[in-house]
Amino acid sequence: MNNKGQLMGLLIVVIMIVGFMGVALIATLAAPIITFTADTLDEATSGLGMVGDANMTFAQEVSVGTANTAIQSLKWVTGIALMFGLLGIIILAGVIRINPSPVFIGFFLLLAVLLVAGSIFVSNTYEDFLNDGGEIGTEMMGMPIQNFLMLYLPQIITVIVFIGGIIIFSGIQGDAYQWIRNFY
């Protein structure tokens, strides 16, 4: 039995979950900073009026105003990307279907507890930024998907690890999913 290959499959899923938590924290903290900066720039450049023959107000609306409108959608784009990231982790657990030895269940549970503990730290860090009362915290209040995902991250990670563990340790060999592996 190839225990090294089985262990690598478990580690890949765990590394993907850790990577997801890191990217989620960075994305949910960067999005409000970027949108706040775009709002400030839009307000600072609006109402410039006429400069010579050039209508600077119209130029601002066409350039900075349009860019600001696009940047404001970053809040929803990052939220949906995070939701697809969670779905991708579950799909990854099904794709790498390894049927590991039952010996690895204890190791998987240890990693699961560490993941949940790490997600508590990430969630609390996000909540500290959310409740700081500053401009960034105010911008973060306008991100409902990210707020839900980050504030309930420990519960979400627990469910993802539980579902991933069921998929990985269900006993079905990877041959049943060979058609998925043929795509890459």
Image (cartoon, rainbow, N blue to C red):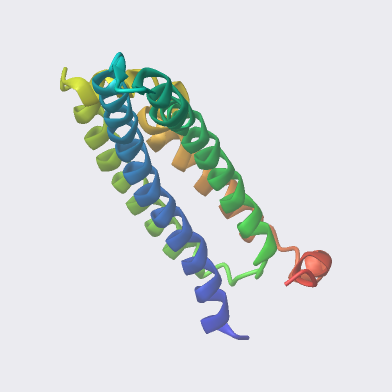
Q: In which quarter of the image is residue 99?
A: bottom right
Viewer-closest of 9 and 84: 84
Residue at 59% x, 72% y is 101
The image position of residue 147, as x and y in percent, is 39, 25
- In the image, taking residue 92 as reference, residue 37 lies left or right, namely left
Q: In which quadrant will I find the N terminus?
A: bottom right
- In the image, taking residue 115 as reference, residue 182 lies left or right, namely right
The image position of residue 54, as x and y in percent, is 37, 24
Viewer-closest of 61 and 116: 61
The image position of residue 156, as x and y in percent, is 47, 36
Against 14, residue 133 (above or below) is above
Q: How many labels does the image show?
A: 0
The image position of residue 88, as x and y in percent, is 60, 51
Viewer-closest of 180 and 145: 145
Q: In which quadrant will I find the C terminus?
A: bottom right
Residue 169 seen in this snapshot: no
Q: In which quarter of the image is residue 45?
A: top left
Determine the residue located farthest toward the bottom in the rendered image. Answer: 1
Residue at 28% x, 41% y is 122
- In the image, taking residue 45 as reference, residue 154 lies left or right, namely right
Viewer-closest of 81 and 2: 81
Against 3, residue 31 (above or below) is above
Residue 32 seen in this snapshot: yes
- In the image, taking residue 67 as reference, residue 52 lies left or right, namely left
